Amino acid sequence: MAELFDKSGESSPITPLGELTNGQEADFFALLAEKTQLTTKDGKPYWRVTFQDAGRQVSFPIWSDAPHAQKCNTEWQVGGFYKLRALYHETTYGPQLDIRLIRPVEETDQADGFDPTMCQPRSRFDFEEMFADLRAMAEEKIAEGPLQTLVLGLLDEHRDDLLVWPAASRNHHAFAGGYLEHVRNVATNALLLAERYADIYPDMTPPLDVGMVAAGAILHDIGKLRELRTSPVGAEYTAAGSLVGHILQGRDMIREAAAAMERDGQEAPDAESMLRLEHIIISHQRLPEWGSPKPPMTPEALIVHYADDTDAKLQMMMVILSETDADAALSSRRNVLGQQVYRGGE
């Protein structure tokens, strides 16, 4: 049982927000991820707040005449951790919380299991294992030489950040470890395609370069280390991320790594290899409106693009399905894909 929440003498078990079922009231810890002041059609102010833990994010209004409106306005801080007692219920407008009690997390809450990481969505996969898998792909699929050295060097140099980095600020894999989850999926699937096509079309001229596919897939999003920064409420864009983006910054990081190899007396990848690798990086999103100045113009770049696009969109679709009512055959169109997704049934 939790410690007494307040002086009323009431107590309630601690139940993660992500595990609450429709109609359940419980005590839980959550991060205030967003607080936005809005206005109703009648001109009345209200707040839209978002509380989250690792398993669920719930956004709902705090009306100006609600019991907690004043404290929401003056005391609730985005990025702050809170202990709540609330009723969770699902509506046609999405999940909602009716807050009974709320206060900032205290040091004594650690005895009830509070840890800041419990309020941050994270990959279901082990971070260290995903990183080790990427290194293994580089070692096994890229021939020993300058290109392999460049890829492994970038992975090792940025290991600490890569272990926890999200793949995006929203839309797909926007959680701790999401970068590694996404990149491992992309590299795995790109290599499956590359090896398959290299096997059935051995007379392709020039031959399909499986090692280049591995290098491009592993490094295609490396610029996100400069595009994004992490915070308690999730990833945020840096100034350079907003003004330049991860694609060009990824190309810059590859060029800088090659230059550093030469300064250290190592052999850097040759000009042709650098050109092909840079092309994979700058074309992996294919369209200018998605950030790519050029479309894929090599077989290797084409494979990486579709592996990347498939993994991102499949993750979006999985989230949409998970948030769709179990009794609904189709999801709403109000989602990141802008379309309905079929769940099943009539």
Image (tube, rainbow, N blue to C red):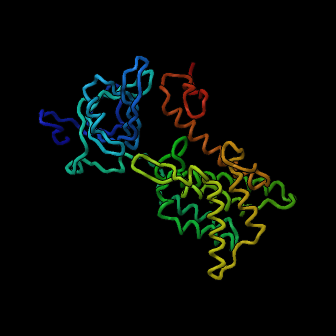
Give me the residue at 60% from left, 30% from top.
338
Quadrant assignment, res 201: bottom right
Q: What is the x, y in percent for residue 259?
A: 65, 73
Residue farthest bottom in this picture: 265
Foreground: 249 or 193?
A: 249
Give me the residue at 38% from left, 29% from top.
60
Please tell me whether residue 90 is drawn above or below residue 191 in the rendered image.
Answer: above
Specify the quadrant that holds the N terminus: top left
Foreground: 277 or 46?
A: 46
Foreground: 254 or 75?
A: 75
Residue 191 visible in the picture: no
Q: What is the x, y in percent for residue 341?
A: 59, 29
Residue farthest top in this picture: 42
Give me the residue at 69% from left, 73% from top.
146
Please tell me whether residue 332 is drawn above or below residue 27 in the rendered image.
Answer: above
Quadrant assignment, res 216: bottom right
